[in-house]
Image (cartoon, helix red, strand yellow):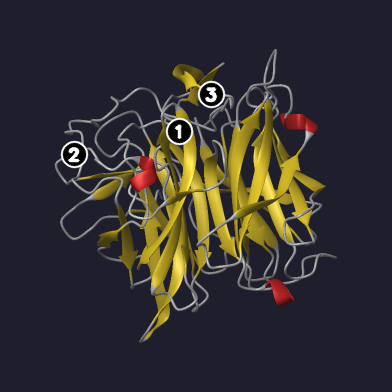
């Protein structure tokens, strides 16, 4: 049967819409997209020349497929609070099998050299074509409620394709055996209307609360905004609190990721999709002193750029790594596509990540990405919210990135220098 991907606009002002269907090659796996963009040209971005990567996915400088089939929205973590399991690398992806959305958990005991599937997260709310999107994987660094450090949390957006009208929710599951078995924990938020709740990500604030950040389309005053809620036990959630909400109703901040620096500063990366122009859906940053109060939500933050003005468009993701001689370490940033200052697609797009040793301030420096993504399409597959996992000493970084293999979107994994 053919696999189709429903692509949801991130630029439209107003209710979420599934605007486009991407018909893929014949495959036994039907992948329903997390989120997507309106058509922008397969190989060329706004005003840009397409950049091809001549390597086939299986030839990506040592990159290997993660799992046996398709997958979307990858995440990777290294266990650090799990006793004898410390050092294991766990990776998750969203897969759709027979209309059922599930979270697939892979494990590596050799630093990412090889993986095997060890667990699956499934729920009736994502069965029978209801939809599952943009999951996250998180290890508790400290006890939260009755959950000890080392407890794994997995959360995702459920129900974007539910008929006759979606009523989306963000649901959380936990594992106490390093990803083998999962049980439902709580619901972070449920949409009061047919609009969406997307892209949950976890952090721990300065008071020890578990915080869930997500993108919220349900406020009629905003096409989309970023919201945070927090919990003392992972079960009951308080808030919500706006973290980024533009003054223009058409602004669409989305895809928040939060990392904490050794000095206690929290850094958030996110995209801001607006009505148009070359900087629509560009990666931004902002900071917080406590991980809960991010200042004026109308402050859209700072655009991340290199010294020569390059910028990332779409689906940014952020990681922190130690760095020799730098007590605050360094940040690593990736985005779906990289553009030059003049708005043309940059030569290294899909093959580049960035590093910054100043807590995200100032210019970022380009380094080769471990996974070289071949496709230049701007939809919900190629290099879409790729995951970066630095080594313990910060000298290397493991990347999990998605790309097309024929008509199937597959996650690939590789390690390179950072």
Q: Is residue 189 left or right of residue 279?
A: right
Is 127 rendered above or below residue 243? Answer: above
Q: Which residue is mark 2?
A: 343
Residue occupying image coordinates x 77% and y 36%: 123
Query: Does the residue at mark 2 contact the one at mark 1 (Cβ under 8 Å)?
Result: no
- The answer to which of marks 2 and 3 sits earlier in the sequence is 3
SS assignment at label 2: loop
Mark 1: few, some, or many residues within 10 Å (few <14, many ≥20)?
Answer: many
Q: Is residue 191 left or right of residue 319?
A: right
SS assignment at label 1: loop
Mark 2: few, some, or many residues within 10 Å (few <14, many ≥20)?
Answer: some
- The answer to which of marks 3 and 1 sits earlier in the sequence is 3
Does any portion of residue 220 appear in the rendered image?
Answer: yes
SS assignment at label 3: loop
Outermost residue on the right side: it is 146
In the picture, residue 140 is in which quadrant? Answer: bottom right
- Gap in angstroms between the C-alphas marked 2 and 1: 21 Å
Q: Position of residue 265 (x, y in %)?
A: 49, 71
| Closest to the observer, 341 or 40 | 40
Q: Which residue is mark 3?
A: 27
Q: Position of residue 412 (x, y in %)?
A: 46, 47
Q: Which residue is mark 1?
A: 380
């Amino acid at each position: 049967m053919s696999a189709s991907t429903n692509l949801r606009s991130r630029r439209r002002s107003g209710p979420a819409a599934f605007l486009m269907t991407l018909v893929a090659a014949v495959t036994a796996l039907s992948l329903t997209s997390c989120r997507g963009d309106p058509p922008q040209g397969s190989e060329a971005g706004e005003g840009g020349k397409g950049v091809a990567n001549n390597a086939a996915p299986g030839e990506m400088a040592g990159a290997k497929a993660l799992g046996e089939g398709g997958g979307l929205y990858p995440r990777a973590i290294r266990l650090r609070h799990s006793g004898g399991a410390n050092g294991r690398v766990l990776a998750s992806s969203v897969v759709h099998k027979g209309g059922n959305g599930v979270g697939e958990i892979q494990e590596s005991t050799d630093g990412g050299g090889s993986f095997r599937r060890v667990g699956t997260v499934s729920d009736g709310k994502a069965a029978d074509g209801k939809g599952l999107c943009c999951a996250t994987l998180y290890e508790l660094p400290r006890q939260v409620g009755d959950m000890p450090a080392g407890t794994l949390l997995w959360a995702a957006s459920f129900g974007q394709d539910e008929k006759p009208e979606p009523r989306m929710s963000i649901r959380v599951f936990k594992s106490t055996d390093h990803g083998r078995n999962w049980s439902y924990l709580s619901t972070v938020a449920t949409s009061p209307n047919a609009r969406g709740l997307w892209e949950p990500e976890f952090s721990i604030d300065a008071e020890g609360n578990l915080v869930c950040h997500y993108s919220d389309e349900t406020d009629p005053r905003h096409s989309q905004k970023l919201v945070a809620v927090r919990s003392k036990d992972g079960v009951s959630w308080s808030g919500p609190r706006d973290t980024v909400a533009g003054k223009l109703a058409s602004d669409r901040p989305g895809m928040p990721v939060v990392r904490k620096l050794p000095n206690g500063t929290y850094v958030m990366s996110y995209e801001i999709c607006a009505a148009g122009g070359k900087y629509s859906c560009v990666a931004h940053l902002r900071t917080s002193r406590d991980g809960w109060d991010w200042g004026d939500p109308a402050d859209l933050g700072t655009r991340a750029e290199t010294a020569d003005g390059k910028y990332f468009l779409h689906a940014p993701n952020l990681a922190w790594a130690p760095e020799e001689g730098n007590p605050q370490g360094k940040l690593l940033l990736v985005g779906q596509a990289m553009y030059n200052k003049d708005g043309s697609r940059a030569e290294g797009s899909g093959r580049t990540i960035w590093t910054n040793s100043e807590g995200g301030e100032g210019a970022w420096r380009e380094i080769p990405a471990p996974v070289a993504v071949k496709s230049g399409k701007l939809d919900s597959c190629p290099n879409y919210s790729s995951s970066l996992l630095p080594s313990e000493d910060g000298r290397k970084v493991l990347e999990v990135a998605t790309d097309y293999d024929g008509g199937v979107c597959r996650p690939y994994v590789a390690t390179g220098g950072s």
